[in-house]
Image (cartoon, rainbow, N blue to C red):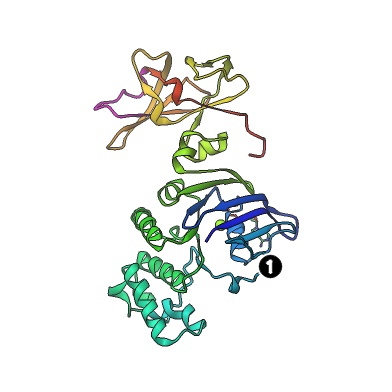
Amino acid sequence: MTLLLTNVAKTFPGGTRALLSTDLDIEQGEIVSLLGPSGCGKTTLLRIVAGLEAADAGGRVLFDGEDVTALPVERRKIGMVFQSYALFPNMSVRGNIGYGLKMQKLPRADIAARVDEVIALCQLQPYADRSIGALSGGQRQRVALARAIAPRPRVLLLDEPLSALDASLRNQLRDELALLLRQFGITVIFVTHDQNEAMAIADRVAVMSQGKVAQIGTPEALYRNPATGFVARFVGDAMPLTGRITADRLHLDGGTLALPKAAEGYQAFVRAEDVRIDNDGPISARVETVTFLGTHYRIALSGVVPGTLFALHGGLSAPKPGETVRLSIAPGAILTLPPEDVDA
Ligand SMILES: Nc1ncnc2c1ncn2[C@@H]1O[C@H](COP(=O)(O)OP(=O)(O)O)[C@@H](O)[C@H]1O
Ligand SMILES: [Mg+2]
């Protein structure tokens, strides 16, 4: 199913503008993540797609070109998974998965066949007859997903489905979920505040800030060509290189860097992996802390920008706190972006 949103906005009674006018175009089978900090409007947008919330007048939601704006949730044929899986604790795995099909009054044999199919797809065979209380967090997550897809929804809507799990399980399930969603072959909107999750799971990521989609693109495009400072900071933790720009030079406290192009009036950003400890570098910095992270050292540096600048250092040894080092940053690694709106 293709999904098209035009001019979709939401103002709650009382005046909270949870979502400003938003357009979104999602292809058949595409997995799109809505990524942004808490309160930026992700859930509101998802609920409007679901039909659980009405958009402000003028907004339209189209499924396969058909206007569903006025259609109630139960007639939109969507599947949903929430952060709290909202499974029925007294029912078995099989009972939970078959529940929606029973409500649809499908013949019993069809229900059994469909339930078996999604149980196999979600690798839940060993648990099919267990009660929900006897499952781990990750298994419950898969049951919630299986239950959502069993009625063959046109679109699957997931709202922070991994955030109830602890960190190590979350990372493992993230990769499993990415594979599983692709096997389903259905259109998916996946809401998260975790950039790694969004990048691992989605074909395209819509980065949201304060009720607006700041930028939408593939994970690579967002990472390499962020459109705003907000996107640069949110996707890949770019750090502001606060200094003065004259033509294609950036003057920092610790020295002057070359920029890829003249960028007066712009803001410069860099990511820690692009800050290099380099004896011949043009920048001087003082090492504050050094953290060994196995694959690399993370080094906090002062004296370059008003705040702290971090460098990821992959060598076998690292400088010591208190030492003065030289740094270089390749011109191509510096992101120059238009100054941000005060509200961005
Ligand atoms: N039912 C509601 N009534 C009033 N304000 C709401 C309601 N639901 C959400 N909001 C507000 O709308 C904004 C966006 O909320 P939400 O879409 O839940 O954000 P997110 O899912 O990105 O954390 C927030 O400021 C939130 O407080
Ligand atoms: Mg939310």
Closest to the observer, 140 or 30 = 30
How far across and how far down the image is residue 230, in percent? 56, 37
Establish if 282 lies above or below 163: above
User: What residue is disc 1 on?
Assistant: 70
Magenta segment boundaries in residue numbering: 311-324
Q: Disc 1 on helix, strand or loop?
A: loop
Q: Quadrant of ligand 2?
A: bottom right
Q: Is residue 344 left or right of residue 179?
A: right
Specify the amino acid type for callout 1.
Ala
Q: Quadrant of the C terminus?
A: top right
Q: Residue at x 30, y 33 (%)?
A: 296
Q: Residue at x 27, y 74 (%)?
A: 126
Q: Residue at x 33, y 78 (%)?
A: 130
Q: Is mark 1 within 8 Å of ligand 1?
A: no
Q: Is residue 267 left or right of residue 254?
A: right
Q: Is residue 93 visible?
A: no
Q: Residue at x 32, y 77 (%)?
A: 128
How far across and how far down the image is residue 86, in percent? 49, 71
* Res. 180 image quadrant: bottom left
